[in-house]
Image (cartoon, coloured by chain):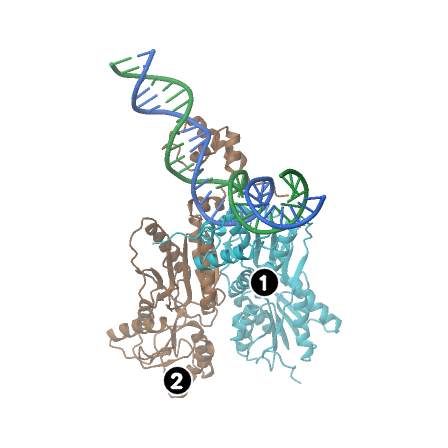
Chain colours: A cyan, B brown, C green, D blue
DNA sequence: AGGGGGTGCTAAATCGTATTAGCGATGCGC
DNA sequence: GCGCATCGCTAATACGATTTAGCACCCCCT
């Protein structure tokens, strides 16, 4: 059934030249190595006629480069966000004619080791090690041997690996500015983390960075944070509980900064229970731009995690690393911050007079 | 920096044997080919000491099998569902020591062709061609050459390829049974498709199959469908509109079968606007088990798309295909149906007296 | 006519493994 | 003491490309 693949030797035979010549022509080294116009055309013609495609496995064995990179993440399934990140990486990879191996570690160190091994065995040109929620990670040994990039993660110990992260501090600033620009100066409550930069759920880096940005802008404007509540996990249920507790505690919030959209989803429910309208009574701004943000009523104004761009950027940075590696240059371990854009929707309004 | 990979030749040298012998021992053909116990142990020892791992690229070139399969889908990013499907495939692949290439076509035929080519160039052992929403597809030429499986998709023309699909008809039956068992016999409305099996959005197979199952069970119980409304796209906004139209049209529904959870999300909003309580006034049952189903209040009872299992099953079926292919056996093109389990939650109650 | 130099192509080695065919040594029978 | 079978291992080749080194030819000059 499967007729044999056409090889370089076939092309050479049809063109009436040696495999060497065929290889030279097809890898575009014809000028450099003085191949006659006639022969060049014969080879190109034969390759086209036979629909020749180089066997990448063979090229990989000979040259060591497989036009393949590995994408290892702790989980691919958690959310659409992960998918967008992969999508960005996929498209950037495609533009460079490179394929992507995907692997999932579920946070298990042995699985991670196995996957990195398996990729190394397949001679990937480089590896992207991704976390689906921004956090610090221990860089596995062996990753520093070849080109690699950390995505949505920071090395726990100093490392020569570059990393790509969302610009969470600037995102915090953006969220604060959204409220300031709407005229809010009091009754601004934080749901999910805060009020102090130590009041964050364990292990989150987004939490503290967003807080830093928020406090910086609010502080500079002379505005005080009215209160903050930590949620142990950033899920709707906790957002509901925290908001309800705030309202029952006699808090009279005019604006909520929720630390992500799922928390905001819960907050909406609690505000609704209390008969408060968004945004007339309470403005809400949030982070992530989860798909649900556009479904909520009123639609949620939120600072988007640029997952797609993160994926793309990781591939770009990885290729820079690969070049650098080839040239034997020093590695610098710089961190790349990807901007988080504000999605202006319907949940923010000026405070009622 | 990167010290050279340790090769079979290195192992052979350390063990003091020829590469041939080392290869024989390490591929477990030692009994069959009369290698002495002593030599066997020396080789195994050397391999362990040197941490030898076979170079899969080389093996691929020599034997033609790369322990790699391709997963090509129309989109990876749309939803968590896609992620779960990939996760299932990933885990099943890992259990077999196989890596996964991921590719995304965005529905473009030329991208699809390019991706399949790129995978073929890398000598994948087989390909899974997946659609993120169940539908019929044109099977690309060249896919029938090697082992391949259709996932969440049916071939538009007859094809020897096997396919893996959720059991949507049985899911329809399940949804109907959930309402019957709660005691509903009238005022059952369909949102998203129906009432007739021709009233479905274009191109959907899930729509007609769910309808068939629903009508079969309801019909067998002597229960009439009170009404149905097609949504052009199964998004919250349309679900809201359809439900609102139903209520304003004087419909007095006792139960809603929504054709997916996003429609149900919109329906909740419309019911809420009308002052109707779920499930006291109106029961709601739906399909998909989107993450949002567990966040809604009351939590949504829904028939789950088994994305994870679909992914796993696809890999299993693909490996069966690969074996069959190796043995040169006939292909049958059978379709595998994966059960859709009901997630019982809080949105269904007996009808008010 | 013979040497030098440029031109246009090819032979052969290589990457790391799998596999076929076969080689040398030993033991046995007669 | 010779032939033959068996045992235990290895040489050589193949997979499909890339790349280094070099060969054959022609032209020109003296």
Q: Quadrant of residue D8?
A: top left
Which callout, 1 or 2, points to the residue nearer the camera? 1
Quarter holding residue B146: bottom left
**Do circles 1 and 2 both sit on a common chain?**
no
Q: Taking A152 as reference, is B183 left or right?
A: left
Pointers 1 and 2 in contact (C-beta within 8 Å): no
* x, y percent for residue B226: 32, 82
- Residue shown at the point (53%, 57%) measured from the top left: A38
Image position, residue A72 (x, y; %)? 54, 54
User: Is any part of residue B92 visible from this angle?
Assistant: yes
Q: Classify A171 as above or below B119.
A: below
Q: Chain of mark 2?
A: B
Chain under callout 1: A
Residues B350 and B77: in front is: B77
Classify residue A181 as left or right of residue A91.
Answer: right
User: Which residue position is annotated with label 2?
Assistant: B246
Q: What residue is shown with label 1?
A: A312
Label 1: which secondary element: helix
Q: CA distance from mark 1 to mark 2?
A: 45 Å
* Residue B334 against residue B212 in the figure, above or below: above
Front-most of C18 and A267? C18
Residue A137 visible, this angle: no
User: Which of these two is toward me, D1 or A12?
Assistant: A12
Residue A27 percent coordinates (x, y): 55, 54
- Secondary structure at numbered mark 2: helix
Left or right: where B198 falls relative to A211: left
Residue positioned 50% across, 37% down in the render: B8
Q: Position of residue B93 (x, y in %)?
A: 43, 52
Q: How many marks?
A: 2
Could you tell me which quadrant the C terminus of chain A lies in? bottom right
């Amino acid at each position: 059934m499967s007729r044999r693949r056409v090889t370089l030797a076939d092309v050479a035979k049809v063109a009436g030249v040696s495999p060497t010549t065929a290889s030279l022509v097809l890898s575009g080294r014809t000028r450099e190595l003085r191949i006659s116009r006639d022969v060049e055309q014969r080879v190109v013609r034969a390759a086209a006629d036979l629909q020749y495609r180089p066997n990448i496995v063979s090229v990989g064995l000979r040259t060591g480069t497989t036009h393949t990179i590995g994408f290892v993440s702790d989980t691919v399934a958690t959310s659409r966000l992960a998918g967008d990140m992969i999508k960005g990486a996929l498209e950037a990879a495609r533009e460079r004619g490179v394929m992507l191996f995907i692997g999932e570690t579920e946070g298990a160190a042995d699985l991670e080791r196995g996957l990195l091994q398996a990729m190394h065995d397949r001679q990937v040109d480089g590896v992207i090690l991704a976390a689906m929620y921004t956090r610090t990670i221990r860089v596995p040994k062996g990753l520093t041997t070849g080109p690699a990039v950390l995505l949505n993660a920071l090395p726990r110990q100093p490392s020569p690996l570059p990393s790509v992260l969302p610009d969470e501090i600037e995102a915090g600033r953006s969220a604060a500015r959204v409220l300031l620009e709407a005229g809010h100066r009091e009754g601004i409550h934080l749901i999910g983390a805060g009020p102090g930069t130590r009041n964050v759920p364990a292990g989150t880096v987004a939490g503290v960075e967003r807080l830093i940005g928020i406090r910086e802008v609010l502080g500079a404007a002379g505005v005080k944070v009215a209160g903050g509540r930590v949620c142990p996990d950033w899920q709707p249920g906790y957002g509901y509980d925290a908001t309800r507790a705030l309202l029952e505690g006699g808090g009279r919030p005019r604006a909520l900064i929720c630390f992500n959209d799922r928390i905001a989803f819960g907050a909406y429910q609690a505000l609704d229970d209390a008969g408060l309208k968004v945004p007339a009574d309470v403005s809400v701004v949030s982070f992530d731009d989860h798909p649900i943000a556009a479904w909520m009523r009123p639609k949620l104004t939120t600072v988007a995690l640029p997952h797609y761009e993160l994926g793309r950027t990781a591939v770009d940075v990885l290729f820079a690393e690969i070049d650098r590696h080839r040239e034997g240059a020093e590695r610098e371990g710089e961190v790349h911050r990807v901007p988080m854009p504000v999605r202006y929707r319907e949940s923010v309004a000026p405070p009622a007079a």
